[in-house]
Amino acid sequence: MAGIIVAFKSYSYRDGIVGSPWVGLENFRFFFESGKAWLVTKNTVMYNFIFMIVNNVLELTFAIVLFELAGKYFKRFLQSVIFLPYFISWVVAGAIAYNLFNFEFGAVNTLLESIGLSPVNFYNTPGLWPYILVYFSAWKTVGYGTVVYLASIAGIDTEMYEAAKIDGASLMQRIIHITVPSVMPTMIILLLLKVSQIARGDFGMFYQLIGSNGLLYDKTDVIDTFSFRALLDLQEFGMAAAVGLYQSVLCFAIIMMTNVTVKKVRNESALF
Amino acid sequence: MKNVRGLMAIGLAATMAVMAGCSSNSSNASNEPASPGASADSTASATASATAAPSAEHKPDTSKAVALKMYLIGDPPKDLGLVYDEINKKMKSDINATIEPIFLSWGDYLQKYPLLFATGEDFDLVFSADWVKYGAQADKGAYLELTQEMLETYMPKTVQEMPKDAWDQVKVKNKIYMVPASTKEFSHTVVGVRGDLREKYNIPPLKTMDDFEKYLDAIAKNEPGLVPFDEGVNGYALFDQLVYTKLTPKFIISNSLVTVDLKDPSGKLVDIAQTPEYLAFAQKMVDWNKKGYWSKNAMVNKTLIKDAFLAGKSASMASNITNMSQAVTTANQTHPEWKVEMFDLYNGAPTYVNPYVGGGMSINANSKNPERALMALELLRNDEEYFNLTTYGIAGKHYELTDDNRIRELGGAESGFKIDSASPWGWRTPAMVKPLVDEPAEVAAIRATWEKTAVTNPLLNFVFDTTNVKNELAAIKNVRDQYMLPITFGDVSDPAEAIKTLNAKFKEAGLDKVKAEAQKQIDEFLKNNQ
């Protein structure tokens, strides 16, 4: 609540949250008059939407493959490898990316040169970054989601599989007609949780991978990085709160719309 | 079922009430600070007027023991505890107080610094400077106002020692919130190069930027293992060297290139982005980037150029003279065969002394013991023993004083308390600072030259009040990051076109409005300071 109030005030330490003077919509001006408001909002929502779809599909696929795989130890090993990047911080991931994509000594460019291709200046080519970002997002988070889906698949009654086998269902048929429908409720809950955060960019990821590289901003700037840069020097609490409020309102609107849609399609899976 | 629901509702309501209580509490807490500060003011002035002769005979009451907390910016050295134990033994007997330094690390001080005041934390002394937004923080009520009576009562030596214009320079809306360090500092850059390589390629000692270019060129052509100048994201030295030497600018609007030329007494704003000098600079940077003087990805490079140089990865470095003095000293200790040299490329071009607002100490508006904090600061600034301890460490363990009153560092790279490592720059005074034994000989000479070429201009003290243009400044910051940095690193294909875009975007962000506001304030300022 305090955040919502501060968004409409010129905050000073002396006067506190209640005592600071009201300034109306003044704190919102910088964001909407920057000419970038639409661009960064679009980037934020689009990136999160793509991350959500790609990551969920990968997570479900990996979970099913892992579940069907034979060999207990190989399965455990694979699961750990996929899960590992989840524990790596974005700071380290940013350093890894720099060593991969550096123009002079990066691993990717060294490889390209060794097979006779000309090197690519990644940090100068905005068009490549949506793919790189989607890749890194998947690399880091898919392991976690896979475990959630695995748990959900493990909860499916094994008698159903046995019955299907006896009736002559192939592996693919069993996956499509038993596994996928059984994990649908889990999937919808996960998606709804992601949708509720759709207007909030993953600051750590965008900040560490892109940093101060202005050449890429048109393709990679999200609300969080944009306002962070704009306000770092000013240190205006009110303006930061204003951006936060804008994101909250946006998230609220989107989650309400999604919930209504879910209710129509599949009433029992709706959040409320 | 009904009952359970009712319970839940009550539970929820209770939670909300607690939360609401929290927020109103915190606002009360942040409402309060004004009163203790104000009462301290009034008691100070009351006692001062009561005794009639404030400075000399007045002995403040120190009967109650006090533990002071002091926030500094930097990373604490290993032997910090040892050194401050020593200080506290003395301080206990002198003013019946102890002092505990707490550090905000270089990595996140910008985010944490304003939070110190926003959370209403209880501490007494805090480092302040224009680069931690001293003016804006003071405006928001972060610091205690220091009245003339307070200063004369608790810091008589400081009042004597401080240059008159220093007090004027730290005033925010005519009130003093900072006791500035009183040493003369320059932020102009010097370059450091490998003497062995310079001689190998027959390049005479560097005098100008063109000589430096010859050196970089020789390295780029002949030393494939070395980056000639490993520019990184925080780099500003080349801009300084190429543009400052021509214009003597003082930046007025942060994150843009709007400045005043300190050689021009009229105080007319100059937008460097629209000058031919800037175009020449941009073209040179593109040229140097193409020739491979630094990485194509300099904009993502976070390694400091000094560190790349000391690690043997690059062949030159540049930074302000204090930084370079330390780097050259270190290089000559670890790699004497490099014969590292330092050159001033200003070559007689006008310089200026940094305004005193570049570093000092302030009292937290929330402080419960502002009197004792000021007395402690007085000791740190003007008592040689305190000053030596905080700056150089423990005599015989971390440093020794030579017969000609120079400092010799002990313990080498392993020393637990290197010079200046405990961030004592808030209380530097010229009478206390001593030269180092193995400081490069050039340092003193360069400083002396710069003091001679320094211009004076009342506008050095001008502080832009940004209250009316905050929204525009936020937009300008983003334009800088997106359109100006690529020019600085030569990462654009057509410099003239890039500058045109930059200026168009600045205009869109409302730079003209900010300029008009700044010009208005400057004219006003000059009228009052003739």
Image (cartoon, coloured by chain):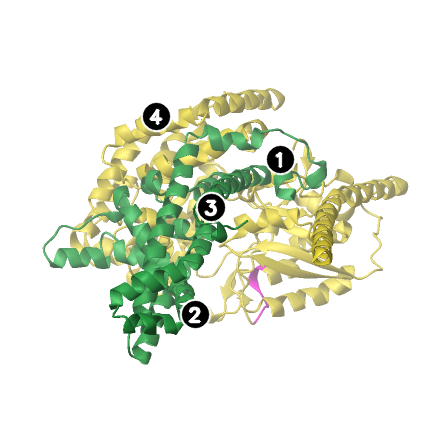
Chain colours: A green, B yellow
Query: How far apart, in angstroms, are the residues tagged by discs 4 and 1?
Result: 32 Å
Neighbour tally class for label 4: few under 14, some 14-19, many 20 plus, Cα within 10 Å = few
Q: Which residues, given as a range, are shown in magenta?
A: B391-396
Q: Nearer the viewer, residue B502 or A39?
A: A39
Q: Position of residue B342 (x, y in %)?
A: 35, 51
Quadrant position of the N terminus of chain A in the picture:
top right
- Per the image, label 1 sits on a secondary structure element best described as helix
Q: Position of residue B345 (x, y in %)?
A: 34, 42
The amino acid type, in three-letter code, at marker 4 is Thr
**Same chain, marks 1 and 2?**
no
| Marks 1 and 2 close (CB-CB < 8 Å) | no
Please give left or right for residue B254 compared with residue B481 in the image: right
Q: Residue at 50% across / 25% down in the picture?
A: B514
- Mark sitting earlier along the chain (2/3): 2
Q: Which residue is mark 2?
A: A155
Q: Is residue B33 visible?
A: yes
> Which of the two discs, 1 and 3, sits closer to the camera?
3
**Same chain, marks 2 and 4?**
no
Q: Residue at 30% across / 77% down in the picture?
A: A74
Q: Chain of mark 3?
A: A
Query: How far apart, in angstroms, are the residues tagged by discs 1 and 3?
Result: 48 Å
Q: Which residue is mark 4?
A: B275
Q: Residue at 36% across / 26% down in the picture?
A: B503
Query: How far apart, in angstroms, are the residues tagged by discs 3 and 4?
Result: 40 Å
Query: How far apart, in angstroms, are the residues tagged by discs 2 and 4?
Result: 70 Å
Magenta: main secondary structure: loop
Q: Position of residue B162 (x, y in %)?
A: 65, 42
Farthest residue, direction left? A116
Q: Which residue is mark 1?
A: B165
Q: Which residue is mark 3?
A: A200
> Which of the two discs, 2 and 4, sits closer to the camera?
2
